[in-house]
């Protein structure tokens, strides 16, 4: 018995010693971090006396202070963090271990971050490195001017976080976005009475910072449910829970917007626009073969079907023509019926085309109505939508979102562009063979939206580069954050609200993060700090970044909504050509029927048409008109052969100089670049790349700065190291000066995946 007690006593003793050692270790890390903060703060004072800009170091100190607080909370709440880690398949088996290690992981990350900042500031003080000052942006003094946000007569880029508490501690260096939330349930009475608490909240708003108005569609007033009945509620698992075609939808919105917009008009927090909807999507299809309703898909109401009948009558004029195409025998358009949701087996058929095209038109009409209601009460208002660009960059087209039409409709390019870096469940994707992250949605999506609306700012109101529910990594390389944010801004992004900040000001997890919390940026000090310091660097060179955004796009890929609706993999096929051209240093763009008709055709030199068999008569005519004016088209044999219903179309007419027939991606790419070279339109800079993957991975752009030198930006999105050779046409020798370090660097650099190379090229 004594032996057993002795064993228990010894075990408890060892346990106590172990727990004490852990506590001492944690205190040691905390103490180390605090000492390093003091050392960095001392250096900051020294640097300021020497006139060195220290905004980045002050930001790093604040990030360290925030995350040391978070680490202390995490240390005391292992059980709560364990639950969130166990929500993730990749961390499920070791959820408790991850939670137990989290606090010290954060402290160690803070220490590395402080060491890096200290080392570089020492170089600056010793004049072994140099830095261009960056403005500490006062968000209350930022204004929107055309395609840029302006602060102190310079373009600036802004970033904040979804759900970040609005404390001075967090707002000073990590964003100060203001705004207001609007939802239908604020209309508390049928006569249009607005909730008095909401009106008081508007009156009492005191933060004069730039922001946006979030129009929510997830709630319905009690009186409306009673008046309109159960049929009014629809698709309640999406972000619009009511039938947009029901007359009651417009009635509510007129009362809501009429009651609130006049009180918000002209306020600073509306300057980034009225966001008409969060992630709009109206999928209306099913898959009977798989016996399941796909994600976010739903039915169509009788109001929608009646609209569809009217649309069909305008489209086809005669019921005999509809019957021919649909292989039906309706006596009139009033008799037309279609099974809803429509089955995916019909994809490629006239019925599928008509429904998909109509679905886009009726959704565009709905948001046109909302825009008109907003601008009726605020004539200076700009609107946008938080559109998921993958609804365009991927293949599906039965979701109701016409990205071109909605971008054209909006005064601000709205989106929630994302990038995928590590998939924590599911099958591997093709991009993982070649790239460090999936950049298709980011680059291709932004090039398209900027082609539609080149003179508008781009506001990503739910940025998903750091994490999504499926793409996450607790040990994410901070260089990835820099790579994606740098690319996004050079491709057109102006401002962003990042996903996300699911902690309270004291570090406590809010619970709002759900399955997306564990392993995300609020547990990653260096990643969060890298975002902030990347924005500082972007703002130091904002004129050069804006020059990249404004670069002429001489090569334009033709996008046909018709082929995208009818083909199963149209966007995959179009991406093959885009991908082949995106690593050549030339800014790419798109044209459509409307871009060809509305915009100055002198803005580009060549239109490329690849694997686009289906086009409407109007699309075909717009291309022919472009050729007739002397425009150059390169086209393959598969393209422009059928109309939307599969009927044959006449061939384009043009001579060998204006209508060039080629079939492979390589042939089209080679010819397009040759034409640019012959016209002296290729970049003056050349970048040659060698890597172990065998396909190019460095995306680059070059612009001229105010003194006439070339500024070169390269991001290695490839999966392997890339060895580069930089040259300047017509120059015997060059020096490359790292603009972020202020020192000469190699003209033959080797870039790791996610690495940025940002230099000024100076002739010797």
Image: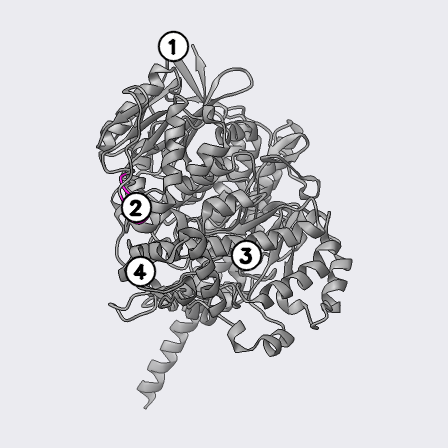
Which SS class for mark 1? loop
Mark 4 or 3, which is nearer the eye?
3
Q: Residues within 10 Å of mark 4 (few under 14, many from 20)?
A: few
Q: Residue 72 in magenta?
A: no
The disc, 1 or 2, on the residue closer to the chain's N-terminal end is 2
Which image quarter: residue 254?
bottom right
Q: Residues within 10 Å of mark 3 (few under 14, many from 20)?
A: some
Magenta stretch secondary structure, dominant: loop
Direction from residue 162 to residue 682 in the image, left or right: left
Measure how far apart labels 4 and 3 are at the Cα level. Answer: 36 Å
Task: Give the residue pinned by disc 3.
Answer: 366
| Residue 19 in picture, x, y percent from top left | 44, 68
Which SS class for mark 4? loop
Of all residues, the one furthest to the bottom in this rendering is 1
Residue 404 or residue 46, whichever sits in front: 404
Q: Identify the image quadrant of the N terminus.
A: bottom left
Task: Give the residue pinned by disc 2.
Answer: 570
Which SS class for mark 2? helix
Point 26% across, 53% down: residue: 428
Q: Residues within 10 Å of mark 1 (few under 14, many from 20)?
A: few
Task: Give the residue pinned by disc 4.
Answer: 425
Point 29% across, 66% down: residue: 287
The disc, 4 or 3, on the residue closer to the chain's N-terminal end is 3
For the magenta stretch, what is the residue range? 641-647
| Residue 110 in picture, x, y percent from top left | 49, 49
Q: Residues within 10 Å of mark 2 (few under 14, many from 20)?
A: many
Point 60% across, 56% down: residue: 214
Residue 633 or residue 12, whichever sits in front: 633
Task: Give the residue pinned by disc 1.
Answer: 731
């Amino acid at each position: 018995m004594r032996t057993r007690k002795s064993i228990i006593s010894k075990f408890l003793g060892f346990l106590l010693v172990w727990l004490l050692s852990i506590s001492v270790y944690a205190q040691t890390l905390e103490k180390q971090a605090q000492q390093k903060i003091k050392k960095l703060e001392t250096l900051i004072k020294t640097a300021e006396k020497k006139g060195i800009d220290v905004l980045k170091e002050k930001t790093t100190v604040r990030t360290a202070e925030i995350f040391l607080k978070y680490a202390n909370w995490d240390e005391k709440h292992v059980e709560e963090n364990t639950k969130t880690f166990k929500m993730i398949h990749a961390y499920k088996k070791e959820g408790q271990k991850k939670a137990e290690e989290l606090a010290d992981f954060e402290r160690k990350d803070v220490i590395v971050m402080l060491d890096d900042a200290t080392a570089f500031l020492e170089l600056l003080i010793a004049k072994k490195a140099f830095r261009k000052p960056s403005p500490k942006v006062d968000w209350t003094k930022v204004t929107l001017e055309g395609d840029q946000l302006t602060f102190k007569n310079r373009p600036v880029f802004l970033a904040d976080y979804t759900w970040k508490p609005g404390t001075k501690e967090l707002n000073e260096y990590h964003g100060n976005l203001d705004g207001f939330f609007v939802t239908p349930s604020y209309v508390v009475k049928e006569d249009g009475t607005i909730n008095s608490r909401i009106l008081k909240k508007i009156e009492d708003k005191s933060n004069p910072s730039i922001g946006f108005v979030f129009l929510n569609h997830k709630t319905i007033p009690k009186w409306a449910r009673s008046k309109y009945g159960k049929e009014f509620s629809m698709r309640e698992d999406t972000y619009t829970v009511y039938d947009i075609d029901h007359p009651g939808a417009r009635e509510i919105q007129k009362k809501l917007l009429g009651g609130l917009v006049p009180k918000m008009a002209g306020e600073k927090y509306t300057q980034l626009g009225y966001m008409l909807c969060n992630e709009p999507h109206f999928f209306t299809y099913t898959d009977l073969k798989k016996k399941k309703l796909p994600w976010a898909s739903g039915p169509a109401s009788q109001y929608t079907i009646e609209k569809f009948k009217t649309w069909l009558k305008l489209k086809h004029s005669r019921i005999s023509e509809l019957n021919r195409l649909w292989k039906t025998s309706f006596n009139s358009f009033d008799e037309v019926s279609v099974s809803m949701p429509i089955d995916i087996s019909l994809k490629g058929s006239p019925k599928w085309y008509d429904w998909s095209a109509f679905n886009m038109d009726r959704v565009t009409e709905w948001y046109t109505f909302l825009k008109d209601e907003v601008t009726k009460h605020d004539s200076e208002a700009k609107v946008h939508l938080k559109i998921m660009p993958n609804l365009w960059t991927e293949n599906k087209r039965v979701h109701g979102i016409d990205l071109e039409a909605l971008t054209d409709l909006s005064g601000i390019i709205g989106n929630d562009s994302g990038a995928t870096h590590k998939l924590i469940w599911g099958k591997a994707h093709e991009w993982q063979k070649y790239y460090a992250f999936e950049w298709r949605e980011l680059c291709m999506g932004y090039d398209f939206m900027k082609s539609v609306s080149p003179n508008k700012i781009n506001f990503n109101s739910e940025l998903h580069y750091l994490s999504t529910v499926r793409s996450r990594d607790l040990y994410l390389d901070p260089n990835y954050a820099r790579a994606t944010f740098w690319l996004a801004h050079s491709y057109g992004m102006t401002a962003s609200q990042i996903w996300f900040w699911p902690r309270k000001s004291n570090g406590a997890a809010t619970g709002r993060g759900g399955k997306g919390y564990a392993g995300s940026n609020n547990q990653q000090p260096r990643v969060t700090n890298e975002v902030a310091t990347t924005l500082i660097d972007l703002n130091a060179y904002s004129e050069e970044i804006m020059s990249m955004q404004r670069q002429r796009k001489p090569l334009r890929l033709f996008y046909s909504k018709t082929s995208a609706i009818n083909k199963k993999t149209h966007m995959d096929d179009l991406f093959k050509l885009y991908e082949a051209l995106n690593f050549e240093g030339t800014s790419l763009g798109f044209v459509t029927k409307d871009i060809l008709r509305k915009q100055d055709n002198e803005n580009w030199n060549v239109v490329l048409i690849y694997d686009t068999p289906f086009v409407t008569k109007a699309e075909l005519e717009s291309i022919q008109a472009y050729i007739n004016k002397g425009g150059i088209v390169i086209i393959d044999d598969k393209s422009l052969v059928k109309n939307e219903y599969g009927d044959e179309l006449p061939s384009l007419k043009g001579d060998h100089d204006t209508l060039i027939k080629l079939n492979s991606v390589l042939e089209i790419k080679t010819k397009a670049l040759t034409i640019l070279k012959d016209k002296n339109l290729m970049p003056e800079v050349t970048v040659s790349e060698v890597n172990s993957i065998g396909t190019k991975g460095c995306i680059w752009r070059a612009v001229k700065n105010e003194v006439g030198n070339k500024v070169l930006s390269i991001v290695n999105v490839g999966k392997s190291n890339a060895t580069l050779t930089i040259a300047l046409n017509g120059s015997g020798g060059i020096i490359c000066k790292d603009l972020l370090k202020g020192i000469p660097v190699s003209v033959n650099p080797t870039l790791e995946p996610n690495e940025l190379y940002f230099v000024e090229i100076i002739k010797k």
